[in-house]
Image (spheres, grey):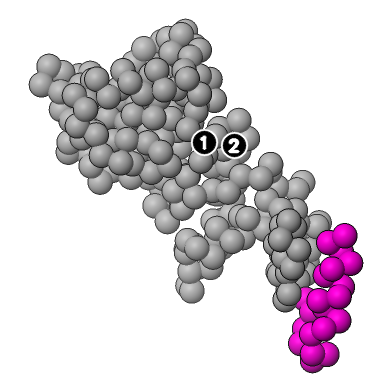
């Protein structure tokens, strides 16, 4: 039993050594959150944290917030949770996964449109920086176009991070919906950024990143099922 083995190891430690910082002694157990953080969390939120809360905390340590020492302020957490709620578990659980055959099929169309001028992008995506039709693969009056894991970005928008987050949101949508994505998308209307639900989601994500450039990239979110309520 893992618990028994832990106890044996703990007993072998010098008595002065705080046991609380030892974790993950049994390799199959997830790391235990830092007890000081747990106490802090309880005091602030009036509830016990869960694994998602711990992962979100670790994310906040990797990416500075807007506080004077890079800590995440209350409003930073609100912005982050707004992003998380907007994407939802359906999409967040697709991070780190390649998507199925449907996504692969659409990725191939994207690669064709990009004339295979693809660069490696985040989280298994490939990005091409191209021009609008007819010189390049992006429709007129459009700055980005996503097909499966293939993202086409207008040449001049290479450093447009909010736009990349918009297009990456489409990647997660493809991974979630598979081959049914494009028929579903078309029901919402082409070039219909205001009313197509897939576009509404992308546009809103883009806006959050425009207003909050400090936010970690979506693909850095470690999704383990949602925070405790
Ligand atoms: Zn879009």
On the image, the x and y values in percent for residue 179 come to 48, 14
Query: Where is 123 relative to 139, above or below?
Result: below
Main SS of residues in magenta: helix
Q: Which residue is mark 1?
A: 97
The image's mark for residue 139 is: none
Compared across the picture, whether 155 is left or right of 57 comes to: left
- Residue 140 placement: quadrant: top left
Quadrant the N terminus occupies: bottom right
Q: Quadrant of residue 49?
A: bottom right
Q: Is residue 13 magenta?
A: yes
Vertical comparison of 219 with 203: above or below: below
Residue 52 versus residue 126: which sits nearer the camera? 126
**40 magenta-colored:** no
Residue that label 2 marks: 93
Q: Which residues are magenta?
A: 1-20
Q: Please report contact status of discs 1 and 2: CB closer than 8 Å, yes or no.
A: yes
111 displayed left or right of 17: left
Q: Name the residue located 48 percent from the left edge and 69 percent from the top edge.
A: 70
Looking at the rendered image, the disc whose residue lies closer to the viewer, 1 or 2, is: 1
Q: Is residue 129 visible?
A: yes
């Amino acid at each position: 039993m893992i618990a028994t083995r832990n106890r044996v190891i703990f007993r072998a430690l010098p008595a002065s050594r705080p046991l609380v910082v030892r974790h993950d002694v049994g390799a199959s157990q997830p790391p235990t959150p830092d007890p000081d953080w747990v106490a802090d969390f309880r005091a602030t939120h009036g509830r016990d944290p869960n694994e998602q809360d711990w992962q979100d905390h670790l994310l906040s340590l990797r990416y500075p917030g807007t506080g004077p020492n890079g800590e995440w302020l209350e409003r930073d957490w609100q912005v982050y949770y707004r992003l998380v709620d907007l994407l939802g578990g359906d999409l967040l659980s697709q991070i780190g996964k390649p998507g199925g055959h449907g996504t692969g099929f659409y990725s191939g169309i994207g690669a064709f449109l990009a004339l295979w001028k693809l660069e490696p992008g985040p989280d298994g995506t490939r990005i091409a920086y191209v021009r609008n039709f007819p010189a390049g693969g992006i429709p007129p009056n459009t700055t980005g176009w996503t097909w499966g894991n293939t993202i086409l970005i207008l040449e001049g928008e290479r450093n447009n991070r909010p736009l990349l987050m918009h297009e990456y949101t489409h990647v997660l949508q493809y991974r979630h919906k598979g081959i049914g994505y494009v028929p579903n998308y078309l029901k919402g209307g082409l070039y219909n950024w205001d009313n197509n639900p897939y576009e509404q989601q992308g546009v809103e994500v883009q806006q959050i990143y425009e207003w909050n450039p400090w936010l970690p990239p979506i693909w850095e979110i470690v999704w383990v099922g949602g925070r405790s309520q």
